[in-house]
Image (cartoon, coloured by chain):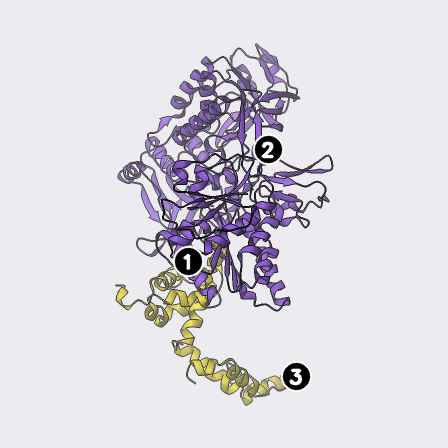
Chain colours: A yellow, B purple
Amino acid sequence: MIDLKNADPHFKWEIIKMEGGEGLLKCFGCSDCAASCPVRYFDERYNPRKIIRLTLLGMKNRVLSSPFLWFCAHCHACTERCPQGILVAEVINAIKNYAVENGYCPEGYKVQLDLLKRLGRLYEVEDFDLKKRQRLGLPPIDKTIPEVARILEHTGILKKVGQ
Amino acid sequence: MRVLVCTCKDKIKLTNLDLGPDVKIEQYFDLCKEKPAIDSDEKVVIAGCSPNLLETLFPNLNCEFVNLYEHIVLIGHPIEKARDLIAAAVEKMKVVTPIKAKIFTIEKKSVVVIGGGVAAIEVASQLAQNGVGVDLVERSPFLGGTVAQLDRLYPEGTPYSHTLMPQIAKMLESKNINYYFNTEAKDIKGRIGNYDITLQTCSRGVIDCTHCGKCVDVCPVEVDDAGKMRKAIYYVPTYPDIYAIDFNACTKCGECVKVCEGKIELEDKIAEQNIDAGAIVIASGLNWYDVDKVTEYGYCRLPGVMKTLEFERAVASGVLKPKKVVIIYCAGSRDANHLPYCSKICCFLGLKEAKLVLDRYPETQVYVVAMDMRSFGTFEYFYNKLREKGVTFVKGKPSEVIKRNDSLVVRTEDLYTNELLEIEADTVVLSAGFVPDTATFDKLGIKLNGDFPVLFENADLGNTALPRGIFTAGAATFPAGVADSLVDARKAAFSVLNLFRQDKIETKQPNAVINEDLCSICRMCIGTCPYGALSIVEEKLKVNEELCMGCGICSITCPVYASQLELFNPQGLSHQIRTLIKKGDVLALLCRWSAYNATDKAAYDKYLYPENVKIIRVPCSGAVDPSHVMDAVNNGAKGVLIGGCYPDACHYARGNFRAKAREQILKQNLDLLGFSRDIVRLEWIGKDEANKFVEIVKEMNK
């Protein structure tokens, strides 16, 4: 049940202020986005209309802590068809950004960030990989890229997710 | 100059008003009752209550209104402010061009009705009964328009002929109607009371007809006429009782000529003729939206996807016997990528098609997929009846129609259960929206706002953008059902009769006037006029007095102020601002249609604002020049607010967009001159948004 006692009436206005979230209020709930979504044909629990609806109702905690928020593949099929001209994928993106800024980052993303910070890559380069490259006649690569960590620090993302 | 001040039964307590020797001040206890004589050529200033009231009591005058009651007394400002406001109005009146009365004589008292559908027939017969000569100009060879293509009419399912045929029979009783079939108005010249219309008539092919029907039997060409097959020579059972040849399809094989008992000429000739009229009624009806632009629904691409009209004709004529039908609503309507509006009648058309197919083949499964069902008023009964008949209504907007294993699949989400839904069907019907037929409006030079004539936007404002001799009936301005079209047609007929009652009409609506000595014919104003009222005639810029609505946008656009609106010119406003604004004031230049009304509302609702906020009424936010803002800034204004209507609600079509564009330039200039760019604000303030206005001026006053 949606309990509006827990609703935050400012939530939608905060999302609108985010980059990409501008069109949110135009939604009249036709469900064209939900019917167009290819992700939804694999997992029906993901529903962009529902995310937007709950955002409009102000169910901040429920939207941000939901794991389904992170299912969007950014194919923009919904953006193409939205009759109100809402950039639906951008709105979802804005909610994601808002979630990260407010400490709702999912564990998977945190692990990836940790890898990026340590290695500068999403995977570890081992001696085995270097040998393979040598055999193929490719130049060796650095095992870590420290510049990436500096970039991450500069953007402030690490602080936001508490690393 | 006379200044008439109303104390509104001593509610306005004036102190000493001395404005110099040229200004004669007259005080009245109750101006509305006393109604002093004012010469209509004389320039006066009337101070009292809101101009919205005074304007109706003192129409057609060369006067500027000063609002003492709402802007001073009600909100508790010191009465000394009245002196400044009146002095500024006097300064303005000194330089403005006075209004010239415009007289239109109505020489010809006959009407041209463009169109041949239900609305046109109703207008023509109503006018002819009242003794007005009518020329009815129809593009197709037969009367009836869209209605004659239908099988039945919603909601009762009346056969189309039961509505149309009695109407035609009634019209044929009147003798003073001339009919022009296969004819279009090629060119329309002139003005109210005296129009000269060039008609272009294509030949009908059949000259003399005994109605034997042999020609149809021998004609080898089959034509798909919106879902129903017919031959290239055909007949629609309305009027006239003569067959016609569709020359777009005819191969001129000559078979029909051989069997004809009458006379057929297979020559595609075009003839022209001129007719006169005092007024024009446009009843050109509507067109179906090109639903093939909604590519995801596959119209034209997938066989079995059709429009409502095609489906209706195909089912009614027995060509199509569907087993499972999906009717998709709002195909291309209420959609930012297609038609942004609701066409009002397509919901019922969809319901009608559902009922039609169930009446004929009761075992058919019918699904209606609609994001909203808009069955207002008594039509709710129609909707209820169809649910009882077993139609399944699905709430949702389908994402696409695809083809799978020889059947069509409509993919949607069922909003009631929140689950994805795929409906397999053999026929998909698209209930598409409508666009009006705008060919005649284009010929008259009436600019359209989106798809519709500007008239529609302003219908409730008493500020119609149509020239005074042009009337509309039926679905020409917005999609309408048969019942609505008939009511609208009677209204149009009444308006024409009302016009023809007079021999001449006189108006004193302010128009733009061109100072030909200053005008260098740079043509900048021609592009900015929302109504296309400006044109170049014999190397001189001319204003079409019938089309000009008095927005003042051209006078601001003109680099040398050669075009000036009567009673409102840039110099006048400039004088007014310079007199009114003192150091530390906030100037509010407010559109008379929206933001100015909000200040009246602020006074009634007691939303108080600081006394250094000075309000000036302008015809449109687009009629404010950057130089006016600079005038105020030079006088030490703390801020300048330009208040206009919301973007889609401009009463002069696009004036507020002009204002928006100017605001950008102005802000850049303010930057260059070293002022803060926040000193000027352009805001959209609705009639009722008193609170918004007060919040803004308070913020600017900080």
The answer to whether any part of residue B220 appears in the image is no
Q: Do circles 3 and 1 both sit on a common chain?
A: no
Image position, residue B305 (x, y; %) = 46, 41
Residue type, label 1: Pro
Label 1, label 2: how many angstroms apart (C-alpha)? Answer: 52 Å
Please report the residue visible at 51 percent of the width from the left and 82 percent of the height from the top.
Answer: A152
Residue type, label 2: Leu
Please report the residue visible at 30 percent of the width from the left and 36 percent of the height from the top.
Answer: B378
**In the depicted view, which residue is nearer to us: B21 or B395?**
B21
Tag 1 residue: B78
Secondary structure under the numbered disc 2 in the rendered image: helix
Crowding around mark 3 (Cα neighbors within 10 Å: few <14, some 14 to 19, many 20+) is: few
Q: Quadrant of residue B508?
A: top right
**In the depicted view, which residue is nearer to us: B345 or B633?**
B633
Q: Quadrant of residue B6?
A: top left
Residue type, label 3: Gly
Q: Which mark is residue B263?
A: none
Chain under disc 1: B
Reading the chain from its start, which is encountered first: label 1 or label 2? Answer: 1
Secondary structure under the numbered disc 1 in the rendered image: loop
Image position, residue B326 (x, y; %) = 39, 43
Q: Do circles 1 and 2 both sit on a common chain?
A: yes
Tag 2 residue: B444
Image position, residue B445 (x, y; %) = 60, 36
The answer to whether any part of residue B73 appears in the image is yes
Tag 3 residue: A137
Q: Nearer the viewer, mark 1 or mark 2?
A: 1
